Image (cartoon, helix red, strand yellow):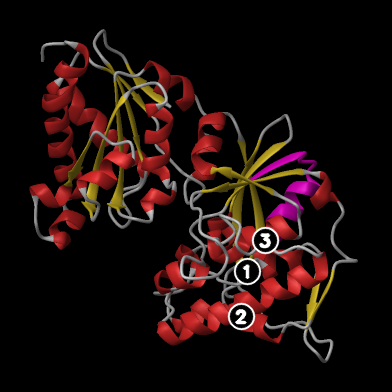
Amino acid sequence: MTEETGAGPLVVVAPDKFKGSLTAEEASEVLARAIKSVSPHSRILRHPVADGGEGTVKLALANGFSPVAVQVTGPLGEPVEATYAMDDAGTAVLELAEASGLALLPGRPNVQTAGKSTTRGVGEMLKDALDRGAGRIILGVGGSASTDGGAGLAQALGVRITDAAGTEIAPGGEGLHSASEIDLSGLDPRVRAVDLILACDVDNPLTGDDGAAAVYGPQKGADARTVEQLERSLRHWARLIAHTLGRDLSLVAGTGAAGGAAFAALAIAEARLCSGVEVLTELTTLGPALREADLVIVGEGSLDEQSLRGKGPVGIAALAKRHGTTVVAVVGRTTLGEAQIRTAGLDRVYALTDFEPLPEVCMREAPRLLGEAAEQIAHDWLSRTTGVTL
């Protein structure tokens, strides 16, 4: 949290990243500066947001945690250096994207990377945190390059997944179809003893029309044929897990997060799901700030139907609305109608495309346009919210 003092209305600025244009930190700086230019007496609290996706570790580091660097297996099997955060009380904050994120791919995601990417490195990070004495682990499950159902994560923690010939399956979602047996005898027992919390920003199940492959596969480079193959593999994986453990969790909300990594963490590691935004408010001072605010400004690159599944801005709006706080969003673009916007807890949405219709210009000149939107927000809302004359 960064505070800019003033005697006027309290404005909480809590944007997520504008993917491809601005980090959450950069967006919060632009918004705060623009608000101050119009309403210099405003008191502004900047809370850049991560909802379980990229930026979760950075937030923890900004709130008293220390960095831990570890070499792990990257999404395509290459070694990568991942950073997580840990505090003196033994709480570790990990980010799946640090080990298996889309940003770690050597180029643009494609059908090959969609099928071969693994979450093994995530399990290796978990193991490292356990080795360092973590008693509580928060894992942000967002930004994944993989759709392997968390099989790689499980393998790194000692689970053997073999085909009919007794050979370890190939990494990635494409390897799941050959899985024949799951041997849990080698599972690190500390995994089920630790308090493992999944900070999850979506409510998608593992399989089905709203599942990991159907909804997020295309973002990871999967074409229609690959999406179908991954869906079949995930269904097979879910049946095998259900047969092994005696329970089917594939339709549980949130198990489709991060290509199904959440599914394996719940089923095998006995983790528990928690809203990424709620975890954020626990790690930071955002919760009390939302109670005291006169105006909350949220934001992200695209506000769409996926956002309605609990992602950053909508999750924060829900928390703020518990206290009757005015919440507006500034976004790159939105596909939501007025009724959906109201349902999301937003009093108004300002899209950069309202200021500049060309998407490529919006991407290129996002800082300027974001500033213009923030100035408009100050003119539109601050005086009516608090009675302050600008």
- First to last magenta residue range: 122-138
Disc on res. 233: 2
Residue at the far bottom in the pictured view: 165
Q: Secondary structure at mark 1?
A: loop
Q: Are marks 3 and 1 in contact (CB under 8 Å)?
A: no
Which mark sits nearer the N-terminus, 1 or 2?
A: 1
Residue 234: quarter of image: bottom right
How far is mark 2 from mark 3, CA to CA? 15 Å
Badge 3: residue crowd in 10 Å (few <14, some 14–19, many ≥20): some
Amino acid type, mark 2: Ser
Q: Secondary structure at mark 3?
A: loop
Badge 1: residue crowd in 10 Å (few <14, some 14–19, many ≥20): many
Residue 99 magenta-highlighted? no
Q: Are marks 1 and 2 in contact (CB under 8 Å)?
A: yes
Residue where numbered disc 3 is placed:
249
Residue 353 placement (x, y as % from top left): 14, 52
